[in-house]
Amino acid sequence: MPKRGERNRKEAEPLYRQIQEELRTKIVTGEWPPGTRVPPQRQLAELYGVNRSTIVYALGELAADGWLRAEVGRGTTVAADVWKAAADSPPPDWGRYVRDGLHAPNLELIRQINDAEPDPALLRLGTGELAPELLPSAAMQRLLAERPEGLPLAYPEPRGSLRLREAVSARLEARGIRASPSSVLIVSGALQGLQLIALGLLRQGATLLAEQTSYLGSVQVFRTSGVRLVGVPMDGQGMRDDEARRLAARHRASMLYVQPSFHNPTGIVMPERRREGLLQACVRAGLPIIEDDVYGDLWLDEPPPAALKARDRQGLVLYLDSVSKSLGPGLRIGWIAGPEPVIERLADVKMQSDYGSSSLSQHAVAEWLLSGEQERHLAFLRAELKARRDLALAALREHAADLADWSVPQGGFYIWLALRRPLPMPKLFDAALRAGLLVHPGEIYARGDRQHLRLSFAYAPPALLREGIRELAGLIRSFD
């Protein structure tokens, strides 16, 4: 579909008819097979640079001719018998193929968020990434330009670039984690690390314990692999070790996933004593741990306690980290540190799936880490994020003190808003979207949650962040 301004409009033909013909062509050529959901009217109007009424008229004409059908709860879709309108042989039933695919579909709300995020007109108040101005693009470009050696274009070795694994190993040692390069696997971001663990280490029907409110609630990697997720209750100190011990025995759990530092979405930092208790509970149960530490570097007031992996003497912990939250999500580089036989198994699974992460990205990250630039960048980043956090907190105190409660995050990107009363989150999400605000409701992270919002202070420009919080508070208040 052409972007705004790319269409060659014919002066003699009405705009609605030009759009109607372009959409009909998508149907006739099979780009939109029967059952395809048509983009929302607002999105089409923005795409074509026309009034919404023009889109309404074009869609109405297509519906009248039998090409489209309005369905309650699904919006407008391509008619199931559209091939009759085309007077042609019926196409394959791609809808059946889509439904029968092994990978579970994303949650509808997350799909809506993913579709909306590229829209520059929206103020992204929940996004889990850094604003472009906080990424060290120019410094990275200068660094790579100064390196005379050629850029690697060949496949990397199964565990990833040795130079990068050596840099990661040294970085982990500075955190008290012993992981030689042979016990490190380079992956295409932390999410792929989770996928490899699900596919390579867990059988179908296995039980994985995770925080009751968790990032795992927003991804399908374990459910798609047939792994059952069981939520462990949390308190203000994170996952409760006594509940983890009880549930591990009750469900014969195979593994435990936890984010001890700057938990996503709540921002909680697990204190020293709780970390020790959780680790010992897992040691006694023989329960392996996936420790997700992607926000660990992003402390704003003081560093968090040592990672679980730094305390691990039994090879119990698989440690997961990446540069996506500090250096750049587009690099798609992360790593897993763990026992060598496990790393060998996961490397084999990875080679079967993608034959290795990007050699260019691995080269760039290795040079960046070895140059010392990452530490300088982190110092800058912590100062910027702290200022944005404080601005967001001040805006909340001014505009939402009567609507919600929150804790002051000590690091990471997020403020976890606990609304004083439940709200119809789909309606709030839609109302915010119409107002130009993209929010992350709590039900993404805990099924049925109607009383939380994840607010990010890492992406929106400071002035717009303050204004966005004011507008969001007004929307919440309008549901009285």
Image (spheres, grey):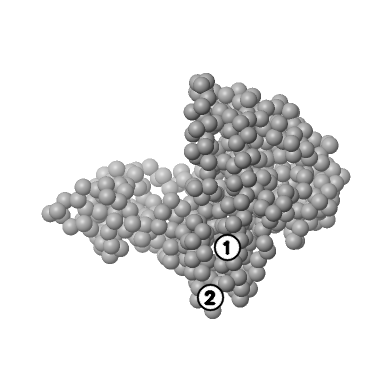
Label 2 crowding class (10 Å Cα cut-off): few <14, some 14-19, many 20+? few
Dot 2 amino acid type: Arg
Q: Which residue is mark 1?
A: 392
Of residues 211 and 309, the one drawn nearer to the viewer in this rendering: 309
Residue, x 77% and y 33% (percent of image)?
178
Q: Secondary structure at mark 2?
A: helix
Residue at the left extreme, as displayed:
12
Vertical placement of residue 408 versus 312, above or below: below
Of residues 463 and 31, the one drawn nearer to the viewer in this rendering: 463
- In the figure, is residue 476 to the left or right of 302? left
Vertical placement of residue 169 versus 322, above or below: above
Question: Given contact means CB atoms under 8 Å apart, are the residues at marks 2 and 1 in contact?
Answer: no
Vertical placement of residue 90 versus 352, above or below: below
Q: Secondary structure at mark 1?
A: helix
Q: Position of residue 120 (x, y in %)?
A: 41, 54
Q: Position of residue 300 (x, y in %)?
A: 66, 53
Q: Which residue is mark 2?
A: 477
Residue at the right extreme, as displayed:
284
Spatial distance from mark 2 to mark 1, Cα to Cα? Answer: 18 Å
Write down the quadrant of residue 350 in the picture: top right
Residue 216 visible? The answer is no
